[in-house]
Image: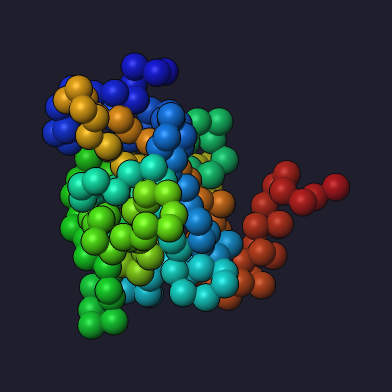
Amino acid sequence: PLLSMFRSVPRTSSLPPLDWPLPHLFGQYELKVEVHPKAHHRAHYETEGSRGAIKAASGGHPVVKLMGYNEKPVNLQMFIGTADDRYLRPHAFYQVHRITGKTVATASQEIIISSTKVLEIPLLPENNMSASSPPYLSCSIDCAGILKLRNSDIELRKGETDIGRKNTRVRVVFRVHIPQPNGKVLSLQAASIPVECCDRQRAECIVSRQAQPGVGML
């Protein structure tokens, strides 16, 4: 809905819920995933320690770009969403995980919105000053991994079933809230290609998914 794109006050509590559909493009503004993550990622439980940041298929990390704006810093929000639902929403069994360390170049902070972990990453104009191209803000996402929830944590989230726990496909979801001259905020959203989260090596992961009832079976 068009009205859901605009909010009067840029407070987290007044922004669109994470399960609301939002456009990636409006007027001069476009939020896009310029470099997508790899199609497979080794998710981890919190007790395992970090398995590393999400990687891009071409090497490096995913890159997100906000076109048409570079006036002031804005926060890029990131969370883990569903890949196979009709409408994208926060995934019940995987959450984003903040990665820190000497090799991490991108600043971030972790917040909770309606029981979903969200990373906030600053997009800074001084990092993207170029007179020869349209205005934009961009960021390489080297500060985020994917956390697999324990069964006890999943049971605390309402409306989830054992069948749903077999769903290991996710999308990495990004949002921005752009301040407008009239005092309102424009919200845009973009999502990555589907990413298969798995505890095993890539080949075993693919075989496991194909063996599920109704998936790749004649």
Work out whether 164 lies above or below 108.
Answer: above
- Between 20 and 215, the one lying in front of the other is 20
Which x, y percent locates residue 107? 22, 65
**Residue lying at the far bottom of the rendered structure:** 102
Which x, y percent locates residue 193? 56, 52
Q: Image point 52% across, 75% down: which residue?
A: 59
Residue 206 shown left or right of residue 119 in the figure: right
Q: Quadrant of residue 180?
A: top left
Q: Image point 34% across, 21% down: which residue?
A: 4
- Between 161 and 198, the one lying in front of the other is 198
Residue 112 visible, this angle: yes
Q: Image point 48% across, 52% down: which residue?
A: 33
Which x, y percent locates residue 57? 57, 69
**Residue lying at the far front of the rendered structure:** 131
Residue 84 shown left or right of residue 214 in the figure: left
Which x, y percent locates residue 86? 55, 31
Residue 44 visible, this angle: no
